[in-house]
């Protein structure tokens, strides 16, 4: 259920981002896409070998890394050139809608936990998503009151940069897992140690 809700919110946020011409909403859609990919990959990998887990994570994270970089570059381009003015009303409504879904998913994950997700891990996930949603709402307020598009671009850059940082850390972890099982390219071959 968490996979379905996050996937639907990713699609809705991308649609709202295109309609509102908002980079902050694009970055928020990536947050929900990341959540959906995490839940979907977890479901698909049940009972599969560890190699599959690391390879799927590597592919998933590489895609998300590329998308996050694209949003970051577009945000900095817009801040520098100042050529966009997103629809603040659409941004605010989409931010509040995604906030309610993030809280609902968090409540569902905590209520249905079986061993792994604890209150702390659920809280950390919900907090990350809620802060991204509130950043979009704040950007909408800033854009609407100031009459400039830079609050949207700034919020998009911040959300995307945070997503980029977490994606890079998890990507390194997946690569380390593969290298540990198959040998790092930089590791000396057996018999070559001094």
Image (cartoon, grey):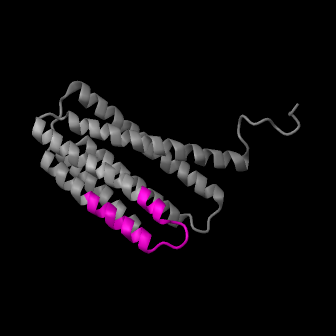
Is 99 magenta? The answer is yes
Q: Would residue 74 appear left or right of 172 to someone viewing this image? A: left
In the rendered view, tell whether residue 33 sits above or below residue 150: below
Between 22 and 163, the one nearer to me in the picture? 163
x 13%, y 50%: residue: 89
Looking at the rendered image, the quarter that the N terminus falls into is bottom left
Return the x and y of residue 148 as percentages of the image width and height.
14, 33
In the rendered view, tell whether residue 171 sits above or below residue 46: above
Outermost residue, front side: 120
Residue segment shown in magenta: 98-124
x 62%, y 65%: residue: 48
Instruction: Say whether residue 3 is visible.
Output: yes
**Prevailing secondary structure class for the magenta stretch in the rendered image:** helix
x 27%, y 36%: residue: 154
Q: Would residue 47 appear left or right of 110 to someone viewing this image? A: right
Return the x and y of residue 23 as percentages of the image width and height.
26, 41
Between 16 and 88, the one nearer to me in the picture? 88
Outermost residue, top side: 80
Is 11 magenta? The answer is no
Image quadrant in which you'd find residue 56: bottom right
Image quadrant in which you'd find residue 71: top left
């Amino acid at each position: 259920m968490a996979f379905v809700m996050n996937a639907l919110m990713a699609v809705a946020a991308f649609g709202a981002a295109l309609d509102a011409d908002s980079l902050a909403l694009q970055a928020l859609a990536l947050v929900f896409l990341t959540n959906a990919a995490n839940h979907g990959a977890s479901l698909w990998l049940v009972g599969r070998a560890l190699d599959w887990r690391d390879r799927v994570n590597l592919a998933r994270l590489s895609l998300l890394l590329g998308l996050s970089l694209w949003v970051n570059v577009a945000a900095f381009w817009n801040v520098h050139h100042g050529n966009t003015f997103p629809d603040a009303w659409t941004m605010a409504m989409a931010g509040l809608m995604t906030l309610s879904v993030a809280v609902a998913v968090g409540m569902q994950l905590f209520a249905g936990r079986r061993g792994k997700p604890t209150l702390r891990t659920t809280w950390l996930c919900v907090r990350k998503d809620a802060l991204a949603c509130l950043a979009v709402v704040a950007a909408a307020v800033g854009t609407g009151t100031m009459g400039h598009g830079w609050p949207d671009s700034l919020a998009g850059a911040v959300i995307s940069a945070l997503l980029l940082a977490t994606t890079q850390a998890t990507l390194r972890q997946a690569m380390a897992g593969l290298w540990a099982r198959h040998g790092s390219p930089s590791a000396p071959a057996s018999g070559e140690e001094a």
